[in-house]
Image (cartoon, grey):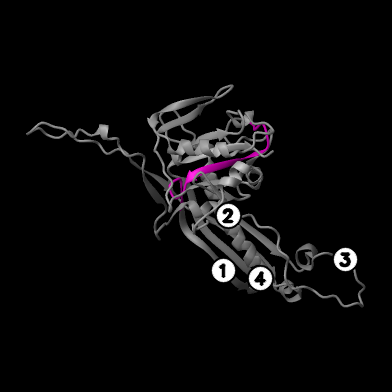
Amino acid sequence: MKDVFELSATAVTNVKGGTQLAGYTLQPVKWLKEIIGAAKVSHFHAQFAKQGMVDINQTSMVFPYQKEYKPSGDFEDTVAENTTITWTTLDTVDGVEAAPADQNAGIKISERALRTNALDLVREAREQLTYYAGDKVDLAVRDALVASTNQAATATRGAYTVYGGDARADSELAAGDVITPDMVVDAKVNLTSSVLKYWVPGTPAAEAISSVTANTWKATSNEPFVLIIAPEQSRAFLKDSQFMNASEYGGNEILMEGEIGKYVGCKVIETSNTKSFTAAGTAADGGGVAGATGHRCVLFKALKAMGLAWGSKPRLRVFDYTSDLSKRMVMDLAYAAVAIQKDAICNIDVADV
C-alpha cells in the first residue's frame, strides 16, 4: 500500500487555508503558529500482543505455541518390572506463521509552500505520518484478534462469543442489548473453564460443547485478562453502579494505557478502534447482517491471544527532492498480526444503545 499526499503551492485549502478573513486588509492580524490538533484515535491493541522481529534475510516468523498440556491420563506411568515403558506422543505443539507486509506512506510539500506558509508544515507532516503508522498497526492487531474465523467448531479450539441481551447471533441483536458487568463474568468463565463452547449456526443458533478440552487460562500480573471496549460501552459501564463499585483501584498496581478500571480481575481498556458494525451492515460474527448498530468488544489473555511480527519497525525519513523543488517525507514499516491461542479470546458483541 502506498499513499501520497501533496501540499502544492496553488492548493488553497491545503496550504493557504480558508479564503476569507474577518478583518480589514489594513488592520494587523496575528497568526498563531501552532495548529490546534484534532482528536486522535487511541492505539491500545498492539501493547498486548506478543511481539517479535523478523531477522534480515528472513521472510516470516513462526509463533510456536502449546495447544494444550496433555492430561495425566494420557501417560502410562505404571509399568511392571522389566517391562518397556509406554511412550507418549508429543503432538500438542504447533505454530502460527506471520509474514510481514510492507505498509508505506509519504507526503510531498513544495519548497514554495514551505517558504510562504506561516506554519511548520514539515513538523505537521511528520506527526501525521507517525499517527498513520500507529493506527495501521493497531487496527491490524485488532482485526487478528476479533476475526470471525476464530470461532470454535466441533473439534477446533477457537474464540467464543457472548451476545448482548438474549441474542445468539449479531443478526438477533436489538436496541437495549448493551454490555453489562454480568457479560464480563460470562466471558471470563469461558476463558477459565475447561469446557469449550461454540455456536452452531441456525435460526436461532444453538450453543454446543466442543469435543476438545479448553485451556483453563488464568490471569497473571504480567499476562492479565484484558477487556477492550468502545466509548459507547464505557458509557454503559460508567453508569452502572455494579461496575463502578467494583472497579475502584487500591494499592500501587500499574495501569495500562487507556485503562479506565478493573472488573472481576480484568483490565478494562477504552479505545475508539474497537471493531464496530452497523444495523443491516455486515455482522462481526460472519452471520449475515447485524440487527443493531454496535461493537465487537473482546476479552483475552495478554501476550497469549495474538502476535505481532515486525519486518521493519516504523522509520520516518525526511529528504530534499531537488528536481521538483520539494521536500519529501516517507514512513515505511512492515508487519503482520496473527491470532495465536484462539481459545484465549472471547468476543462480546453488543448494541451501542
Q: Secondary structure at mark 3?
A: loop
Q: Which residue is mark 4?
A: 122
Q: Residue at x 48, y 60 (%)?
A: 312
Residue 63 showing in the rendered view: yes
The answer to whether the residues at label 1 and label 2 have Cβ atoms under 8 Å apart is: no
Inter-mark Cα distance, 2 to 3: 40 Å
Q: Earlier in the sequence, mark 2 or mark 3?
A: 3
Q: Secondary structure at mark 1?
A: strand
Q: Earlier in the sequence, mark 3 or mark 4?
A: 3
Inter-mark Cα distance, 1 to 2: 29 Å
Inter-mark Cα distance, 3 to 4: 25 Å
Q: Which residue is mark 2?
A: 258
Q: Which residue is mark 1?
A: 317
* Label 3 crowd bin: few (<14), some (14–19), many (20+), radius 10 Å: few
Q: What's the amino acid at mark 3? A: Gln
| Residue farthest toward the left in the current orientation of the protein | 82
For discs 2 and 4, the disc positioned in front in the rendered view: 2
